[in-house]
Amino acid sequence: MTDIIFSFDTEDFTSSRAADGILYEANLFREEGVTGCFCVVGLLAKHLKEWGRTDVIEALSHHEIGTHTYGHTLHPMINEYTDIEDFEEAQKELIRQETLGIEYIKNTLGVDKVWAACPPGNQKSYVAMYGYHKMGIPIYADTFCDTEKGTGAYYCNIFHAYYAFGIEWFLRDATEEQIKEKLNELAQRERAVIYTHPNMIIKEDFWDAVNYHKENLVPFGQWIEPKDLPQEITDTVLKNMRLLIRLIKNDPRFRIITYSQLANELKNDGERIVTKEQVKEIYTHLQKGLFPMQKPYSLSLADMTLACRDLLQGKKEHLCGDVYGFLSKPYEITEEFTLSKDDIISACDQIKDGEFLPEKIKVGNEYIGPADWLYGALEVLLGAKSVTVKPKPQLPSLDCMPEVRDSAFKGTWQHSDSFEDKYLSNRLRYQSWTMRFRTTSPTVNP
């Protein structure tokens, strides 16, 4: 069965007229008995109150709420201001801005929790992923960090759900047969997030395309408003949207859920504990390649590393929690050499809780990569008195997440011309040691 989540990028803070799209869609879904998640831009929430749009605010009260960031495409965007070397400084600014945006959302809409964070476009900053988790948001939506089948994945400590199907343009002229064909495609996935932009059933163009393309084109508040769509297009989209909902509701292949339901199911997965009895199984798994473990345990490479450290230091078990990847490319040895058991154990102090993993680890008089240490630690835990490390890759394959593997943000979407992508794309890949999959998901092959 495929889980369907309806997600709304609720974003245009420049036009009260565009907010009619929110009203229409929120009321339509309520009439059909379906709860969606409206991911709201903080500045839009603030302006809904200032515009006196109590009708829109009331309509949203029947749905769950997420965040679509503080200012969407207002420059500097998330990718632009977090593309700096100092992670702590970048995350501090991220949390400052996003906390303010969420305060606007909570104050206007009267909610006490936002269930998903959905940064716009390709704003896939690893800083934001860690930051939203730190802020207590359980789901990261519209992500690169999911499998092609939509199984979902943890990456940078937060659970990711991919946007599978955008409907506003499709529904402008789709026939019932075409809608059914699309549902056949979605039924092949474990989870399909169906998304829409409410402003785009009202307006001919995106608000940020005319106000924020690469830079802040106009003074704040003096916005250019795109032309309205002909009413017949709006009516057709809404009619087909209702048809889509009814087809999904009556199709036993689908279950309509919300981000909050997904979050609660994730919570029920329980604690993940590693003991010495599991070491052999972890070691055997890693002989097939450097990749997270899914069955019978959901373990990231970082989980395995921290567990080995604890067990080598005499602890009976390791309780898995927050993990971090690397801030630069992990070190790779160029020739093999042998290390003693004591060399491996003495290096444990270099691996800290709540910190990024070290890119290279000193053992005796040598430096090795983190994967070298992990394999060596497992061998020592299995009784080896010495270990031989050989040159090998230090990062797992990201073929299961091709958009992460190939990410390159510079010159894309609405990024300013001065945006360099000096750190973000590479560091996103370097967080692959935090990647893991649920034990309840279909097996993900490395």
Image (cartoon, grey):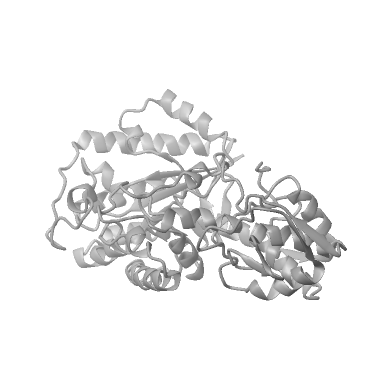
Quarter of the rendering occupied by the C terminus:
top right
Q: Nearer the viewer, residue 312 or 102?
A: 312
355 sits left or right of 118 in the view: right
Quarter of the rendering occupied by the N terminus:
top right
Is residue 228 in view?
Answer: yes
At which x and y percent is residue 44?
A: 27, 61
Q: Nearer the viewer, residue 88 or 23?
A: 88
Q: Nearer the viewer, residue 149 or 29?
A: 149
Question: Residue at the spot x=22%, y=42% of the render?
Answer: 205
Give the number of callouts. 0
- Please say if 171 is above or below 437: above
Question: Residue at the spot x=13%, y=52% of the render?
Answer: 224
At which x and y percent is residue 371?
A: 67, 57
Dividing the picture into quarters, in which one does residue 111 lie?
bottom left
Is residue 270 in view?
Answer: no
Question: Residue at the spot x=36%, y=53% of the render?
Answer: 120
285 sits left or right of 113 in the view: right
At which x and y percent is residue 154?
A: 58, 56
Dividing the picture into quarters, in which one does residue 394 lie?
bottom right
At which x and y percent is residue 202?
A: 23, 44
- Please say if 143 is above or below 168: below
Q: Nearer the viewer, residue 134 or 354?
A: 354
- Please say if 23 is above or below 360: above
391 sits left or right of 264 in the view: right
Question: Residue at the spot x=68%, y=43% of the render?
Answer: 443
Dividing the picture into quarters, in which one does residue 422 lie?
bottom left
